[in-house]
Image (tube, rainbow, N blue to C red):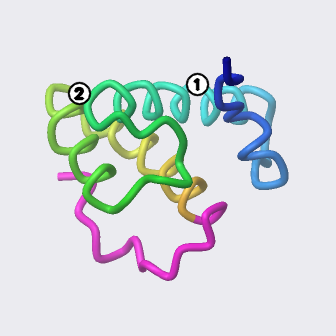
Amino acid sequence: MTKPFDMELFLMGLLSGSKATQHRHLRQARIMRAAIQQRWQRDNPWTWQVKHFRWFFAHHLKDHSSATRYYYQLTAILIWRRLKNDLRLGSLTFVS
């Protein structure tokens, strides 16, 4: 049996700001992980690709407000930073 992926450990060192902001990022990252896991069977962010993020924002958050999508975009940027990805997130359209 494998241990579930620890998103808090994954984002440790990148989380700054108030405790409420840190908890929001962790909660949103866990929601993102669960949605991508359910749809794509990708259990942890190390296996995620751009298409997974695009799917999450285009389909999973389609009925949410632009403010909600914006806060999820901030969390996605933290995850990408942790992955040290060379992708420039400015080219992705998360918030419409």
47 is within the stretch colored magenta: no
Question: Alpha-carbon distance for marks 1 and 2?
Answer: 16 Å
Circle 2 crowding by C-alpha within 10 Å: few under 14, some 14–19, many from 20: few
Comparing 20 with 4, the one in front is 4
Predominant SS along the magenta part:
loop
Q: Which corner quadrant of the image does residue 94 belong to? A: bottom left
Q: Which mark is residue 83?
A: none
Is the Cβ of the residue at disc 1 closer than 8 Å to that at disc 2? no
> How far from the left and from the top, in percent, is residue 21?
68, 34
- Vertical placement of residue 93 versus 9, above or below: below
> In the rendering, which numbered label is found on residue 64?
2
Residue at the spot of label 1: 27
Secondary-structure class at tag 1? helix
| Relative image position of residue 19 (x, y in whole percent) | 80, 29
Residue at 37%, 60% (x, y): give it. Answer: 49
Q: Give the range drawn in magenta.
A: 81-96
Residue 29 relative to residue 54: left or right: right
Q: In which quarter of the image is the N terminus?
A: top right
Indicate the amino acid at tag 2. Answer: His
Residue shown at 47% from the left, 33% from the top: 33
Rendered residue at 72%/26% (across/down): 20
Q: Where is residue 5 in the image (x, y as percent from the top left)?
A: 65, 31
Magenta-colored stretch includes residue 85: yes
State the residue at coordinates (47%, 53%): 47
- Judged left or right of residue 23, residue 42 is left
**Precedes in sequence: disc 1 or disc 2:** 1
